[in-house]
Image (spheres, coloured by chain):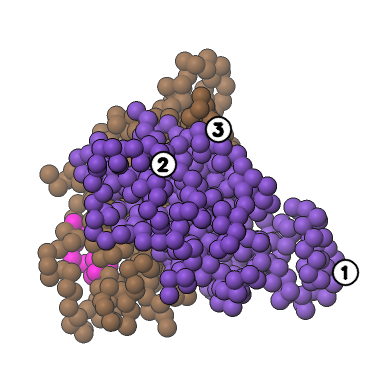
Chain colours: A purple, B brown
Amino acid sequence: MKRKFSNAMVGVVALGLGWSLPSLAQGDPLPSWNDTLTKQAIVEFVSRVTKPGGPDFVAPAERIATFDNDGTLWVEQPMYVQMAFALDRVKAMAPMHPEWKYTEPFQSVLEGDMKALIESGERSLVELIMVTHAGMTTGEFSKIVTDWLATARDPRFKRLHTELVYQPMLELLSYLRANGFKTFIVSGGGVEFMRPWTEKVYGVPPEQVIGSSIKTKFQMRDGIPTLFRLPEVNFIDDKTGKPIGINEAIGRRPIAAFGNSDGDLEMLQWATIGADVRFGAIVHHTDAGREYAYDRKSHVGRLDVALDAAAVNGWTVIDMKKDWKVIFPFEMR
Amino acid sequence: MKRKFSNAMVGVVALGLGWSLPSLAQGDPLPSWNDTLTKQAIVEFVSRVTKPGGPDFVAPAERIATFDNDGTLWVEQPMYVQMAFALDRVKAMAPMHPEWKYTEPFQSVLEGDMKALIESGERSLVELIMVTHAGMTTGEFSKIVTDWLATARDPRFKRLHTELVYQPMLELLSYLRANGFKTFIVSGGGVEFMRPWTEKVYGVPPEQVIGSSIKTKFQMRDGIPTLFRLPEVNFIDDKTGKPIGINEAIGRRPIAAFGNSDGDLEMLQWATIGADVRFGAIVHHTDAGREYAYDRKSHVGRLDVALDAAAVNGWTVIDMKKDWKVIFPFEMR
């Protein structure tokens, strides 16, 4: 039996049958969401799978929800935060590498020529990532990330990147956890770039963060065990890599998945198709005033195939402009 | 500051200082453990890291404990259970492969010639694993494992393999969880061979099982998303692979680790060396009467280097014969 919760259907069900929504009765757990069909679809789904004895009840152990990170939980424009980190690291490391002044892709980075950098292609970007992300222990890398995030600011909002997370999604994470869900991040970004801060910012502990990774090597150094980061790709957690990574790390299929781009298509398919009550949703960036508006033609976070698939599969499309009262936590103060 | 809990030291501390052991006062959580220094070391460690305001207190989120599986939680002699599974699968699949009657290593398996099989070397064993573990979806493989475990019996004990788990270790898993620990399995065995049953047998959910794996491929089949198992090694979770796997899957260092063979050496090092209060332990198979006795010269589960390292690093060596009142749950009935 397949049941899909499109916005329209849930509206009909909720209004037509007069179902009670007990979670809302006891204080609104999603105060930053406007009272639209999107919010109703989320609450309706959670109510159904958590109702003891109900036909759609899901045992707590099986309540797995997966979230993309870039563009789903925090801002990914004008470039991925991790790319901004890599560029800053090149600048910080440049004094140790005088040859970079005359060597691409480093020269473009140091001269701030983003156009030349982008045109230099994917191999150049991978080289930048490897140079800045490998060559140290896991502990050292964690500290570098933590130190950078403590001071680096977004060029438009002049805020720390960890302040540019979406308040409605923070509420959604908490709401799901309060209803027995285990929340996971499943990101194309580097797993060790996220783990130092996801628990504090999202309430998601390191062991529930899945991401791309480079290889590491175990070695004893002066009698102390270390993991040394190597300049070699281990796993790319994007597109078909997302269901593969979910299976490797979790070993269960999620019953809910949240993404925002074509990179999340296969995760949404894996979570929702061919099973009973499931919830898939896509954050659609529709608010150029408060954040950004982009989809089918964007170079970062392109949403094209997955937007078409949303209509076919009954995934909820979250319209940032219409569905969200506020975008960022600092707007609440 | 380094503090290591050798049996002797804990005995001195517990007796000499007259520390209270509150967990024991309220009903014994480890009833199948004899009241030896080993048991005292375990209880002492848990008491210290869980005492609020104490100098060795560890926040619940950081209470990660990792357990090897073969030989640490269940019987690994006379051969790994997963190897017995592979051999049985070859026999079950043989009617579809008439050429196996004349092709090694299958011929040896079908003729029951274990000596020839072992002499055929590691490459042959990998071939057996690939033929029997790949070529189906993850869901299909899970069902094959579940069906096999429901009927396959150990040659000596005539019991299901899932009955041949160590009762004292089941109690230890529960005791740690009752004290806020998150328990993980970190095994050289295949992760998808363990996940179908670890929750029921050990109380360890799939997302807390780390193991070796083969690659998978995401594909839509008749509109349904599947992960197809490929005959290609993805990750070997043994020796240095254990800390690497722990870091990839958990992203925190364990504060306690339990193993039984040289394959667990690096996990024990990673968990215990160079940090504050930690607990490392090795299950030493010393009971030929009730189970098996083997260590430095065994082909399966060799314990040699790690046994020497235990003395150097203050890891507790669990003496099955002396420390355990019973070995298996069915002895309790």
Q: Quadrant of the N terminus of chain B?
A: bottom left
Q: CA distance from mark 3 to mark 1?
A: 45 Å
Q: What residue is drawn where x is 55% and y is 63%?
A: A290
Left or right: residue B296 versus residue B290 is: right
- Callout 2: helix, strand or loop? helix
- Callout 3: helix, strand or loop? strand
Q: CA distance from mark 1 to mark 2?
A: 55 Å
Which of B141 and A98 lies nearest the eye of the viewer? A98
Sooner in the amino-acid sequence: mark 1 or mark 2: 2
Q: Mark 3 falls within which chain?
A: B
Q: What residue is drawn where x is 74% and y is 52%?
A: A122
Both marks 1 and 2 on one chain: yes
- Callout 1: helix, strand or loop? helix
Quadrant of residue A145 within the rendered picture? bottom right
Please state which of the two labelled residues, at mark 3 or mark 2, is closer to the viewer.
Answer: 2
Q: What residue is drawn where x is 63% and y is 60%?
A: A77
Both marks 3 and 1 on one chain: no
- In the rendered image, the vertical position of residue B309 relative to residue B263, given as above or below: below
Q: Is residue A97 magenta?
A: no
Left or right: residue A257 versus residue B37 is: right
Q: What residue is drawn where x is 77% and y is 79%?
A: A95
Which of B278 and A163 lies nearest the eye of the viewer? A163
Residue position for label 2: A7
Quadrant of residue B13 within the rendered picture? bottom left
Residue position for label 1: A102
Specify the segment rendered in magenta: B32-43
Q: CA distance from mark 3 to mark 2?
A: 28 Å
Residue position for label 3: B219
